[in-house]
Amino acid sequence: MTCEACEAPLRPGVVFCERCGAPAWGRLAADEAEARTATDSDQRMLRDVAPHLPPPSPHAKHPASISPEEATGEITIKPGDLALVPSWWVLTRDGSRTQLVAPIVLGRKPTHDGVPADSWLVTLREADLTTSRSHALVQRAGTAVRVTNLSTRAGIPVAWPNGIKYVLEPGGAMEFVSTCELKLGAVSVLLVRE
């Protein structure tokens, strides 16, 4: 599958393009409709073979031309390449701005229970106690940011500048590739990609 906006390859299960941040479900619907019109033999082949194949890429290389870094999935970042890695910031209503260089636990009275030991604890101040003690874990995931809902009762509404909205259910996790707003109880938190 590829992104309709920038034609970048999409990994299975992603909701947004990792390159441009465009929603991926329009392409998913088109792919599903196309799969339904395939012949029976095509459908048998897809059912039997597709789960074992990597997703197709328009930029696929011949195996002989793949470098050792590409073969292992590891890359080497040189000093000049650091500008290519985006910065992520967590902005809270009280005006604090924290760069996401370590995992951050957001909540009314956050603790290190069940999260990485090196996590930073960021207290969200509110009057009506609608935010859980440890409500969300925010951490880097490559060039994206991964949000895990640590609350056992409350979902986390997520909104993007283009009007798309989603609710991250209790215990759920999701990766984001573009700036968005999280609503932790009555407190709004912005995740900003620069």
Image: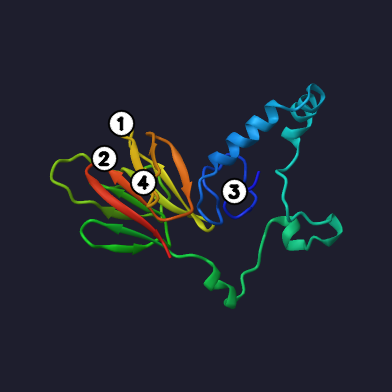
Alpha-carbon span between mark 3 and mark 1: 36 Å
Which residue position holds label 1? 153
Which residue position holds label 3? 4
Specify which label sits upstream in the sequence, 3 or 4.
3
Q: Amino acid at mark 2?
A: Ser
Alpha-carbon span between mark 1 and mark 4: 20 Å
Residue 132 vertical placement versus 67 (above, below)? above
Which residue position holds label 2? 132
Percent of width and height locating residue 104: 37, 54
Asked if the residue at tag 4 contacts the one at tag 3, i.e. Cβ–Cβ closer than 8 Å, the answer is: no
In this view, the residue in front, 163 or 68, is: 163
Residue drawn at point x = 33 percent, y = 47 percent: 182
Specify which label sits upstream in the sequence, 1 or 4.
1
Comparing marks 2 and 3, which lies closer to the viewer? 3
Alpha-carbon span between mark 2 and mark 1: 9 Å
Q: Could you say whether the residue bearing mark 3 is in a helix, strand or loop?
A: loop
Specify which label sits upstream in the sequence, 2 or 1.
2
Residue drawn at point x = 74 percent, y = 34 percent: 50
Residue drawn at point x = 60 percent, y = 49 percent: 3
Q: Amino acid at mark 3?
A: Glu
Alpha-carbon span between mark 3 and mark 4: 21 Å
Percent of width and height locating residue 6: 59, 55
Specify which label sits upstream in the sequence, 4 or 2.
2
Local crowd size for mark 1, using a 10 Å CA cut-off: few (<14), some (14–19), many (≥20): few
| Left/right of residue 164 with respect to residue 83 in the rendered view | left
Comparing marks 4 and 2, which lies closer to the viewer? 4
